[in-house]
Amino acid sequence: MHTIDGSQGEGGGQILRTALALAGVTGTPVRIERIRARRPKPGLQRQHLMAVQAAAAVCGGRLEGDALHSQEVVLHPGRPVAGDYRFDIGSAGSATLVLQTVLPVLLAAAGPSTVTIRGGTHNPLAPPAEFLCHAFLPVLARLGLAVDVALERHGFMPAGGGVLRAAISPGRTRTPLDLRDRGKALGRSATILHAHLPSHVAHREAQALKHALRWSHAEITTVEVPSDGPGNALLIRLDFAEVSCVVTSCGELRKPAEAVAAAAARQVQRYLEREVPVDEHLADQLLLPLALGAGGCFRTGPLSEHTRTNAAVINAILGPVVTWTEGGSEVLVQVAGRGA
């Protein structure tokens, strides 16, 4: 059994999700202690509890400690089980992060699966559905992994009620990744989502973004979407020949529209200035599929504490498969895959 300290490094829910996914794929039991111990609300919140229970469901596993606010969980996994799964978080907790937990396990199953998750789809501290569709999944396709994600209904905090559906078709051929350059710029666009809010909120965000990035009006679209409650998210997509970057900034209560736009603009400017293909969020997401597949390398930088912690958990369970070489603000990440 592997024992993982849930308070190490960045100390968040990613430690839990990565450890659970690896247990489900490898068939080795895992104990996660001190879960989110340094957070204002330590232990399992609803989103984390759903991830724990979902992980057990997709590998036919047995759980200990799966209760709200629990700071220790043990998963005794069976084998990955293909099927048609439905998970309801019961709050606006991130549906994409629950999917992140079960996806590696179902990619190791013997047949195709579908997963439908109800919860939040656009959360301040989680990748939105658009990040999965336009940034993450195209890279998985290059690795030989077939996953389709559909956003069936938007869910914002605090109401939730969003629906995300994924179709997962495990492939047996794995291809290593070499992603060191972006390639030619192909296009750029911004979409401002809003639900149950005055129309001037989206308009102000569009104006502020246009001025901050010096983009044209035609490159920025506002879309009113159906949702259980009010919400707002600004999504920017930068397409290159080899990779796409998706930048997100979510509206929050008492956060001015101009501040939402400014936060997104800063992220875009940082990404373009660094000239690396993989931004910090995609870097974090790529480690696990590379480690479980044929491995590979990518250029990013600088590494976030989130990514360093994720690498530490992977290395604790699989051995030292994730390494990197830092040169100033640029980092070359190399991952030795199990399927290489």
Image: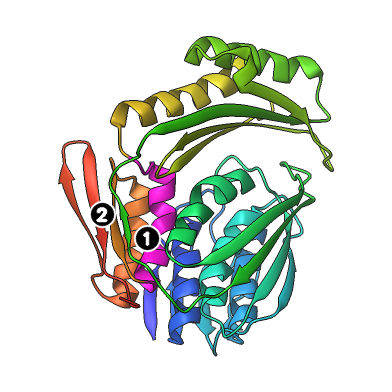
Image quadrant where residue 167 sits: bottom right
Return the x and y of residue 150 as percentages of the image width and height.
70, 54
- Residue 189's place in the image compared with 178, above or below, is above
Kindly state the secondary structure of the residue where label 1 is placed: helix
Residue at point 35%, 78% (across, down) = 339
Image quadrant where residue 49 sits: bottom right
Q: Name the residue under label 2.
A: 333
Query: What crowding class fits label 2: few (fewer than 14 Cα within 10 Å), some (14-19), or many (20 or more)?
Result: many
- Residue 325's place in the image compared with 220, above or below, is below
Nearer to me, 5 or 264: 264
Residue at point 55%, 62% (across, down) = 100
Residue at point 34%, 76% (across, down) = 317
Q: Name the residue under label 1.
A: 287
- Taking 1 as reference, is 80 left or right? right
Please say if the residues under marks 2 and 1 sit with CB atoms less than 8 Å apart.
yes
Residue at point 73%, 18% (across, down) = 201
Return the x and y of residue 310 as percentages of the image width and height.
37, 59
Nearer to me, 294 or 35: 294
Query: What crowding class fits label 1: few (fewer than 14 Cα within 10 Å), some (14-19), or many (20 or more)?
Result: many
Of labels 2 and 1, earlier in sequence is 1
For marks 2 and 1, give the CA distance. 9 Å
Looking at the picture, which amino acid does disc 1 mark? Leu
**Residue 11 visible to the viewer:** no
Looking at the picture, which amino acid does disc 2 mark? Val
Q: Is the magenta stretch mostly helix, strand or loop?
A: helix
The outermost residue toward the bottom is 78
Return the x and y of residue 324 as percentages of the image width and height.
21, 55
Q: Residue 310 carries which label?
A: none
* Residue extent of the magenta highlight: 277-293
